[in-house]
Image (cartoon, grey):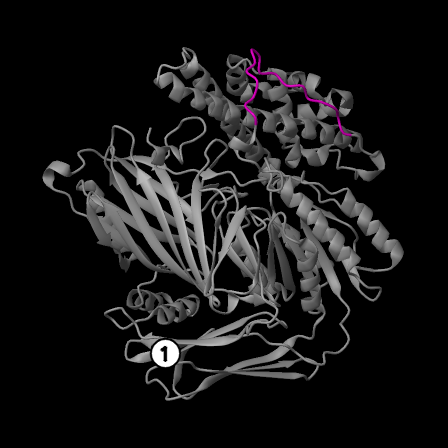
Amino acid sequence: MNQLTSALTGLGGERVALCDVTVCAVLQDLLAEVTVSQTYRNDERVNIEAVYTFPLPLDAVLLDLEVEIGGQLLKGVVVEKKAAEEKYEDAVAAGDAAVMLESIEPGLYTMNVGNLLPQETAKITFSYAILYRWAGDRLRFFLPTTIAPRFGESHHLPHQAPEASLMVENQFSFRLEISGSLRDAQFVCPSHAVELEKSSDKVVLSLKQPKAVMDRDFILNVKAPQTTRSFALCGQDGDGLAAVASFQPFFPGLQAPRPLNLAIVIDCSGSMQGDSMEQAKQALDGILDGLQPHDRVNLIAFGSSTKVFSERPLACNKTNLAKAKRFAKALDANMGGTDIGTALIEAYSVVGGSESADIFLVTDGEVSLWEPVVDAAKKSGNRIFTVGVGSAVSEAFVRQLAADTGGECELVSPREGMADRVVRHFERMRAPRAKRVIVRWPQGATHIAPSRIGAVFEGDTVVACARFDHPPPHGSAILEVETDNGDVFRQELAFPTATPSISPDGISMVARVTAAARLTELDDVAGLETALRYRLVSPWTNWLVIALQTEEDKAQDIPALRKVPQTLAAGWGGVGGVVAFCSVDAFEAPTMMNSLRFDMGEKLAFELSEVKPALRVPPVDLPESYRRLLGLIDAQTSRLELAGALDLLTESGLVAEFDDLFRHAADLDLSVDVIAAIVLARLLSGPMGEFLSGEAQVALASLQESAKEATGAMKEMARHGIALVRKTQEPAARELLRCRAEDEALARFARIGELLDQLEDAIRRSTDRTQAYRDSRARRTGGAIA
């Protein structure tokens, strides 16, 4: 296997069509242009269709796409969506190569590479523009690299739905050039090891290693206390002019901070295990510490169900805050799926419909169908301030939820400062609200976006766009904000000289950015017309490239579908972590063992008083085998440990559901007892865990910790083993070392990776089955205070 192909081969040796990703970005003041190259290679004996769903920043505006394949360099064109799909399918059916890039939801895109012939390589390069925003004196450069698993059934087509694998490590290279007013800023990268080169006119930032695993967002925090943070841009738009105004308002002489009526909603679903839950608890500590005696507060934890601290918001005196902190301390990521809609409905009820009430939500946002949640939130009348946590947060959901309710969003990856973001949200919530916000443009402005400015907070960027059919000789844009206490803020930005377009149609990058800002407010007809005129990927349009082949080069068969899996996000569900992350090369080679069994180590000790009582009676319509399992645990809690896990699954009748998994483990000489313990711990982390007694919850917490360690040990064993075997392949090929069992060892380690994926699939199917009975459970109010 050549070096390029091996870069994105699965740790288990499986073929991955995507073999290289390169990102090069230029950040000039607040406007960035990012170029991404994805290289696909077919190392199989049949022609394939590679399909890769990937994330981009929510505000990204795709600009260009070109494809290099079979000696041809082809430019993409924007085509109406249905027509693009038909042309793509027709080309593939005719044996020609075709590439189609489509937007499947805000921030998610699918690349379709049809008819990649055996041993053929296709390099697809696209670029996007993005306008960044200030939050105080901080700017956050953000590049998502993977999509974490989401709760609920995907509403995307099967070939588009993202799938994660424990054993695939997609990798990327990265280079960022920074110039203009940000050249002298301070830079902190909490996500990756990077190096900086500074010259008189720019700063160049790149990864310290040539490649990095695509298991987390790339984050660069830029702090520039002294720089000018408001500006205007102008660009040619055919015969007219497009303008962008980026304001940063500051409100002098604010009155005393207003008291809060606050509902804190904390995600305790299974996906929050590990880094995300640690971040959530940091946020919760910061929120509670920031409350004042005149504030009122309630807490809601959620997963598949909800736990409410109090029946009503309570005054923030020392007694109530101490009780709230005890409630928070007992929380963990063990409440099943991410039913965030139900949790927010509970929050709307708890705050009593008061328009002055705010909701503070901490979540990783990993929900498949989130649009209905946003729609319901808009109708509630409550502002929602979100903190998106984790190494691969669902940006679109947490940002849209905040924006559409008049709140604001902060994204916080592991190793970023949580306290600063909590303080920032408190400043926003306590500040006077903007009751009138107007952007005044020179005469002749049309296509103004947004048509209505949403919430405005001190120090947060406000962006507005407009088009002029006839460019004004001079002019400026003016932002006016009046708060509900009568203060008025006014900021004026003069238009600079317009940037001419190098495009034959006279449409500049600024014009395309302003057109993209209008799309969300347009109907289907106007949206399609605008997307086609400005060459934008949208809900109505796709990028399309068709590479016609000669008769002898045409594919003869229908291509085999090859979905490119996502690398599992670092720290997701307790697997790995960003803080402690290391590559394979950072470890010493493991000792080869005859038996792959695990010492589960010491159990963790918990205070019974810290565990909330659970609902003990499961619903009658829960499947009999699950009811039997709960009964066995209730009768003898001491059996809820490693040595008793397999017997519990057997006696309950659940062992049959995992029979293939256990046989696979036995074939690999892995301890079936340990695998059974992992299965049992994961099962009870879902909806069924709600029915355990307090004593059983203590035992389960210990079992879960052991299962987490065992899962990590298996993953590391597979990674190290494969790395070690591969290191022997080159000496063996040169006949310097004889390794007759090399292929057998590699296959064995690969099968450990397959077993981990098999375990995830089995648990998912079982959890989905029990999830169907959620609505029959009574909701708890653990920790309620009279």
Q: Nearer the viewer, residue 342 or 395?
A: 395
| Most foreground residue, 46 or 356 | 46
User: Residue 184, how many percent across, how many down?
Assistant: 54, 65
Which is more toward the observer, 133 or 563? 133
Label 1: how many Cα within 10 Å (few below 14, some 14–19, many 20+): some
Q: Is residue 773 left or right of residue 181?
A: right
Q: Magenta region: which residues?
A: 588-604
Q: Is the stretch drawn in magenta largely helix, strand or loop?
A: loop
Q: Report if residue 212 lies within the magenta region.
A: no
Q: Is residue 544 left or right of residue 377?
A: left
Judged left or right of residue 443, residue 282 is right
Magenta-drawn stretch contains 600: yes
Question: Which residue lies most toward the right here?
Answer: 319
Residue type for callout 1: Ala
Q: Position of residue 776 (x, y in %)?
A: 65, 40
Return the x and y of residue 664 as percentages of the image width and height: 50, 17
